[in-house]
């Protein structure tokens, strides 16, 4: 994914959490509010912070941004992790998930990155809260906010089908960059954003602003994404807020499990959008998917679901990460 897509997804995750505030139990509602209040103090950080993994860290070649499967009926294994029911792409690939797959371990670190960043955020906050204000070994809040944004980057990458598929769609193929450019263009087209200040326009209630000079938003994939989000609800939303992994899907006990389940769905989405045997006359090394059928129709059809799932994921991974330190600080054990 590209720069403004990452920031937009994080800002949408904040909007989603705001609509959810009040739907959890009292304790969890308070934590959602604290998380939102915390992140909203750094509106200017979103574009840059969510992009550090690509511009500064650049661990793409090390597998930080990917988790690459291939079908392997002979030597592969069945991955047992499944995403929670609000993952909308699950509906498209449910019947495929029990197929045996192999992982390219050289370039597959994404769930490890997310788990590590989440634990680092927990540790950073716990240390900071115990240190006297201004102590040199304490972290400051903006540093913690940047870690949250970096975490959102890797979480969103897990939803990009081609990040989870071991076929090379980047070089010489243009499928990977074309797919990500489609999302980036839609966001920059319909939302008010300054590339000079690297900030999205937000109103006084911190809502993203549409560019009013643009027409056609109602027919865009982004509008469809909003409609999908409007119908979403997480599993266990009514459960007592004593268990930060309640939303991660049955059997998923940590963010690593959750991200593996997301990547498995993404891999099968990639196979759905770009079948192993390309349609007649199509060469994946040269095809431009934004111009050629059935790809141009497929990316319009599936993108709203992919983007909505990414927004849900950032929201729930951020909330889980926030609860992870707060419950630990209160010595609350997980309740299963
Ligand atoms: Zn990335």
Image: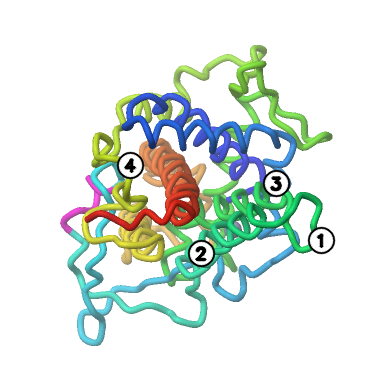
Q: Which residue sits at x=47%, y=64%?
A: 115
Depth check, mark 1 against mark 2: the one in front is 1
Mark closest to the chain's N terminus, 1 or 3: 1
Residue 272, picture quadrant: bottom left
In the displayed orientation, state which residue is furthest to the bottom.
75
Mark closest to the chain's N terminus, 3 or 2: 3
Q: Nearer the viewer, residue 136 or 89?
A: 136
Please provide the residue range marked out in magenta: 90-95
The residue wearing badge 4 is 241
The x and y percentages for residue 102 are 32, 79
Q: Which residue sits at x=27%, y=79%?
A: 72
Ligand 1 within 8 Å, label 3 CB: no
Q: Describe the element under mark 2 as helix, strand or loop.
A: loop
Depth check, mark 3 against mark 2: the one in front is 3
Q: Calculate the distance from the C-alpha at mark 3 to the C-alpha at mark 2.
A: 39 Å
| Residue 61 visible in the picture | yes
Q: Calculate the distance from the C-alpha at mark 2 to the C-alpha at mark 4.
A: 42 Å
Mark closest to the chain's N terminus, 4 or 3: 3
Q: Which residue sits at x=50%, y=82%?
A: 106
Residue 319, picture quadrant: top left
Which mark, by number, is residue 136?
Answer: 1
The x and y percentages for residue 34 are 54, 35
The residue wearing badge 3 is 141
């Amino acid at each position: 994914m590209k720069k403004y897509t990452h920031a937009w997804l994080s800002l949408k995750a904040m909007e989603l959490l705001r609509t959810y505030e009040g739907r959890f139990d009292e304790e969890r509602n308070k934590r959602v509010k604290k998380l939102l209040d915390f992140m909203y103090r750094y509106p200017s950080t979103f574009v840059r912070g969510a992009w550090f993994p690509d511009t500064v860290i650049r661990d793409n070649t090390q597998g930080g941004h990917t988790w690459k499967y291939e079908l392997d009926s002979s030597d592969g294994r069945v991955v047992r992790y499944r995403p929670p029911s609000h993952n909308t792409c699950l509906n498209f690939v449910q019947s495929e998930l029990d197929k045996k797959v192999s992982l390219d371990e050289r370039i597959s670190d994404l769930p490890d990155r997310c788990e590590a960043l989440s634990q680092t955020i927990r540790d950073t906050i716990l240390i900071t809260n115990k240190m006297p204000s201004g102590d040199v070994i304490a972290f400051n809040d903006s540093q913690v906010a940047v870690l949250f944004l970096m975490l959102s980057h890797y979480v969103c990458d897990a939803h990009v089908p081609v990040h989870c598929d071991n076929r090379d769609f980047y070089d010489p193929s243009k499928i990977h960059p074309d797919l990500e450019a489609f999302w980036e263009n839609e966001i920059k087209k319909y939302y008010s954003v300054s590339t000079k200040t690297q900030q999205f326009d937000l109103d006084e209630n911190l809502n993203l602003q549409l560019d009013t000079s643009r027409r056609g938003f109602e027919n865009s994939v982004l509008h469809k994404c909003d409609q999908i989000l409007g119908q979403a609800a997480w599993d266990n939303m009514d459960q007592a807020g004593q268990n930060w992994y309640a939303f991660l899907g049955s059997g998923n006990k940590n963010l690593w499990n959750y991200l593996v389940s997301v990547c498995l769905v993404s891999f099968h989405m990639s196979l759905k959008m770009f079948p192993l045997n390309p349609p007649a006359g199509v060469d994946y090394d040269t095809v431009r998917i934004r111009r050629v059928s059935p790809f141009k129709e497929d990316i319009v059809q599936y993108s709203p679901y992919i983007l909505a799932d990414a927004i849900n994921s950032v929201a729930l991974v951020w909330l889980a990460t926030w609860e992870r330190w707060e419950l630990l600080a209160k010595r609350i054990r997980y309740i299963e």
